Image: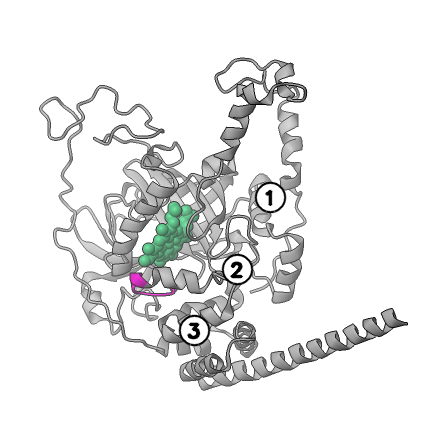
């Protein structure tokens, strides 16, 4: 992994308004009130007028008072783009999904990239999970993928969702990210440590959204035309390669360009340096499920090497920046339950929980008709849902509004090949530290990388209470003796530095006070 310095390309971000003026050499039109009435220039000034009877002034401000909508509960800071998915391989043996069949077929899509724990307006440069979410507008409905840039997730029991996101965000009193909360949670819920170690590796600070791989984690059931079933993990592999920032580069960018990832993505697309990912799937057959000696539905571990084979489906390419962030990105609503025939979906507890809560969150954030917002609307839709706050689109005009009916309202179809029985998955609460040891010893490719992980972990442990520090070091040692001792040594070194810095500060203070006295 290395820093990829291709940021010398023209900075389209800073040229955006100049570009607009070039495309529109004259004003785009006459300014109107929201009712369409042309606005007289005298109504653009309020001085020396009766402000309280100016409806125009009231409308302008009362609209502004309402222009914020709630930010997403997680992944609030994001940026979007448009593109397409192109099929490059014949995968009809595995899935009948129309979007994945027919080499050369292109499907339009919208994406949103985000960083997990930052609020809207926060910094991109945070050692934290990065996400790519995709909505493909297929002929058979919207297909959404929600992914992270590391291949293991942070918990397996959906009840941990609330506590996990709280522990890793700001302390409710101090409003500061709080290492004590994080390590308290990590040591009481050690299953979260695996993903955390991945984030402490070089992959935890990618050099922009486009230089990372992305994984939807869940094991999906897919089926072909004959009804034969397969169990797959999808992977989006970046075509440009994996490039990461060092901590020092990160510190500089954090203060100089906290929107660095947004800028990088926008500029790459504007300069026709289109970001692209290969979509592939790792495949197990139904019979393999009973043969493998690990739980293939467990999102907090990897499938064992050699137990599966991988097939490429196609390419995701981003070739257009959004026109308007609020319309095309903020108003998107993604849901892992947006699936198409040929992809039955995951069956684990996490997925069952997510089916409910993305919908619930979007009902709150975007309103009950979120699916009618143009950016979320599928290519084809005929339903019996009606009315409610805007947008209602054509509200199905004069079609019957109850089902069943004898007047030719929309009717369901029969998917003959859809699996008739659901696999029942029993999941364990047992903690297995073996995958963490494998990550540390086998996936981290060098001793220097192991050292960087240990130092990054130690950085998050400075100033936590002593009893918690002992608990954390014990857990890390249980993962691997070498990891425990490296973190312990790195932590002692950090404490020494911070003690010396404090001494320096005190000496400086006394020197300043003496100077003032003189
Ligand atoms: C119990 C498990 C989970 C629950 C209850 C949950 C819930 C939520 C909710 C309520 C939102 C806000 C949705 C919105 O306002 O539009 C959200 C967003 C998000 N979640 Fe989850 N989540 C879970 C697991 C996961 C997993 C496993 C992933 C990783 C694949 C993930 C990645 C994301 C991302 C990337 C977003 C932002 C989506 C966007 O850009 O619109 N979540 N989640």
Q: CA distance from mark 3 to mark 1?
A: 41 Å
Identify whether 23 is placed above or below 431. Answer: above
**Residue at position x 59%, y 48% in the image:** 264
* Numbered circle sitting on residue 451: none
Can residue 234 be seen by looking at this rendering? no
Q: Which residue is mark 1?
A: 267
Q: How many labels sit on residues?
A: 3
Q: Give the x, y percent position of residue 139.
A: 30, 35
Q: Nearer the viewer, mark 2 or mark 3?
A: 2
* Disc 2 within 8 angstroms of ligand 1 (CB): no
First of labels 2, 1 by sequence position: 2
Residue 165: name its quadrant.
Answer: bottom left
Q: Secondary structure at mark 1?
A: helix
Q: Give the x, y percent position of residue 409.
A: 16, 25
First of labels 2, 3 by sequence position: 2
Locate the C terminus and report the quarter of the image it occupies.
bottom right
**Residue at position x 48%, y 17% in the image:** 35
Q: CA distance from mark 2 to mark 1?
A: 33 Å
Q: Which residue is mark 3?
A: 184
Residue 158 counted in the magenta span? yes
Locate the N terminus and report the quarter of the image it occupies.
bottom right
Answer yes or no: do the residues labelled 2 and 1 have beta carbons within 8 Å?
A: no
Give the dominant element type of the magenta stretch: helix, strand or loop: loop
Write the start and end of the magenta stretch as one range.
Answer: 152-159
Q: Secondary structure at mark 3?
A: helix
Can residue 30 be seen by looking at this rendering? yes
Left or right of residue 99, residue 327 in this image = right
Q: Which residue is mark 2?
A: 175
């Amino acid at each position: 992994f290395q820093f990829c310095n291709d940021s010398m390309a023209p900075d389209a971000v800073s040229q955006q308004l100049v570009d607009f003026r070039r495309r529109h050499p004259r004003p785009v039109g006459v300014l109107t009130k929201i009712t369409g009435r042309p606005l007289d220039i005298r109504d653009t000034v309020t001085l020396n007028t009766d402000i309280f009877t100016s409806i125009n002034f009231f409308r302008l401000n009362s609209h502004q008072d309402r222009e914020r909508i709630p930010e997403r509960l997680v992944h609030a800071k994001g940026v979007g783009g448009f593109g397409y998915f192109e099929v490059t391989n014949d995968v009809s043996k595995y899935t009948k999904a129309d979007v994945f069949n027919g080499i050369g077929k292109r499907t339009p899509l919208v994406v949103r990239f985000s960083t997990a724990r930052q609020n809207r307006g926060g910094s991109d440069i945070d050692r934290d999970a990065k996400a790519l979410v995709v909505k493909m507008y297929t002929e058979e409905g919207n297909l959404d993928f929600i992914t992270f840039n590391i291949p293991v997730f942070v918990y397996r029991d959906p009840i941990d969702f609330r506590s996990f996101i709280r522990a890793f965000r700001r302390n409710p009193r101090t409003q500061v990210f709080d290492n004590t909360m994080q390590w308290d949670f990590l040591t009481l819920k050690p299953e979260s440590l695996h993903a955390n170690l991945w984030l402490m590796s070089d992959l935890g600070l990618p050099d922009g959204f486009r230089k990372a791989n992305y994984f939807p984690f869940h094991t999906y059931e897919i089926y072909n035309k004959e009804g034969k079933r397969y169990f797959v993990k999808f992977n989006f592999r970046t075509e440009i390669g994996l490039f990461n920032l060092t901590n020092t580069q990160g510190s500089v960018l954090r203060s100089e360009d906290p929107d660095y990832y947004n800028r990088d993505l926008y500029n790459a697309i504007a300069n026709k340096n289109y970001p692209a990912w290969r979509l592939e799937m790792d495949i197990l057959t139904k019979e393999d499920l009973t043969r493998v000696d690990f739980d293939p539905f467990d999102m907090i571990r990897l499938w064992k090497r050699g137990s599966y084979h991988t097939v490429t489906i196609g390419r995701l390419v981003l070739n257009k920046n959004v026109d308007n962030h609020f319309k095309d990105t903020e108003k998107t609503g993604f849901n892992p339950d947006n699936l198409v025939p040929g992809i039955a979906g995951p069956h684990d507890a996490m997925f069952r929980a997510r089916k409910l809560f993305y919908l619930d969150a979007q009902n709150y954030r975007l309103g009950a008709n979120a699916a009618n917002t143009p950016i979320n609307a599928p290519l084809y839709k005929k339903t019996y849902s009606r009315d409610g706050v805007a947008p209602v689109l054509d509200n199905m005009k004069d079609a019957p509004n109850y089902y069943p009916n004898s007047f030719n309202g929309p009717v369901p179809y029969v998917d003959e090949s859809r699996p008739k029985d659901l696999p029942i998955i029993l999941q364990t609460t047992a903690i297995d530290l073996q995958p963490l040891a494998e990550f540390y010893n086998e996936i981290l490719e060098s001793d220097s990388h192991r050292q960087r992980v240990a130092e990054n972990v130690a950085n998050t442990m400075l100033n936590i209470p002593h009893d918690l520090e002992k608990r954390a070091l014990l857990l890390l040692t249980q993962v691997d003796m070498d990891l425990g001792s490296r973190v312990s040594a790195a932590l002692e070194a950090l404490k020494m530095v911070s003690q010396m810095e404090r001494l320096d500060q005190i000496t400086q203070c006394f020197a300043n006070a003496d100077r003032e006295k003189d």
